[in-house]
Amino acid sequence: MVYWSGNSSNEGIVGARPVLVGSAPENLLLHSLRGPVLDLVRQHLRKVLLTSQSAIYEPGDLLTKAYFPEVGAISLVVVFASGRTIETAMVGRDGMIGGLSALDPQPVSHRAVVQTEGAASVIDLEMLRQIARQHDVVQSMLFRHQRALLAQTQQLVACNAMHSLESRLCRWLLRASDACGRRTLSTTQECIAEMLGVTRTSVSLVAHTMQQAGLIRNRRGHLELIDLNRLRECACECYAATARHYDYLTQVNGAATDILPG
């Protein structure tokens, strides 16, 4: 990751979904704070570039920074003794990295790896903890995010056990598009296969069929989502379930304490 210089409260800010061409990127979770509290948090942010396939942290690390992606997606993965990994959640412009560590500073149990390149705002965790102690809306945001992240992880466990590769691939692509705020994803079939816990050949066969049907366009290092409506029709119910949690998370204001929708 390469750091951008300076603090920038208004730099690099993605409006509401869907992303409009020419709109400046912004983390939607941060934006849900609004008002003076959002301005306070922005004073302590700095920008970083997210390089594809770079690890933000490894299992056992004690985090010192929280990341609020603005463009790009970060996969949270479990690392097996064999070296293989599988995705347990995806974080993008509607979430954050390091939220649990802001609430409870303990070593992490998984790896966070940049799945599609982009940019993020970063804040020192100790500063975020101080702000959360002083402002209930920030603490509420952290708790709400952890509930949404847990819901996504639970949904993925069920999805991997119950649904076909085609529907899971459609779900993954749609979630990645939501996380990035883009229709074109800078990733490879090999990376997607690893996240889904299947072989590259299996993903290639399904992706080829989807391209022939006009749902996606695949070119070296990039995958473009062409027909979002048909992708949603082909995706399993897990995509819509996860999207509801994140829509709720980013649309309510910081004072909300309602239970997430089921």
Image: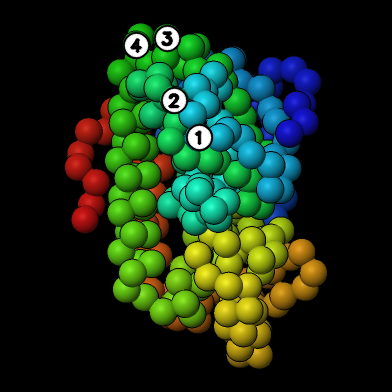
**Does the image show residue 64?**
yes
Q: CA distance from mark 2 to mark 1?
A: 7 Å
Q: Is residue 131 left or right of residue 211?
A: left
Q: Sequence order check: which comes first, mark 4 or mark 2?
A: 2
Question: Counting other residues with Cα less than 10 Å from the Cα at mark 3, is it few (<14), some (14-19), or many (20 or more)?
Answer: few
User: Looking at the image, do the residues carrying marks 1 and 4 touch, with CB atoms under 8 Å apart?
Assistant: no
Question: Counting other residues with Cα less than 10 Å from the Cα at mark 4, is it few (<14), some (14-19), or many (20 or more)?
Answer: few
Q: Is residue 53 above or below residue 64?
A: below
Q: CA distance from mark 4 to mark 3?
A: 5 Å
Q: Sequence order check: which comes first, mark 1 or mark 4?
A: 1
Under mark 1, the amino acid is Pro
**Any mark on residue 164, and which?**
none
48 or 18, which lies in front?
Answer: 48
Task: Give residue 246's position: percent from left, percent from top.
Answer: 39, 49
**Does the image show residue 237?**
no
Q: CA distance from mark 1 to mark 3?
A: 25 Å
| Residue that carries the numbered disc 4 in the rendered image | 133
Q: Is residue 125 above or below residue 173?
A: above
**Any mark on residue 59, and which?**
1
Q: Sequence order check: which comes first, mark 3 or mark 2?
A: 2
Q: CA distance from mark 3 to mark 2?
A: 19 Å
Q: Give the quarter of the figure containing the C terminus.
A: bottom left
| Residue that carries the numbered disc 3 in the rendered image | 130
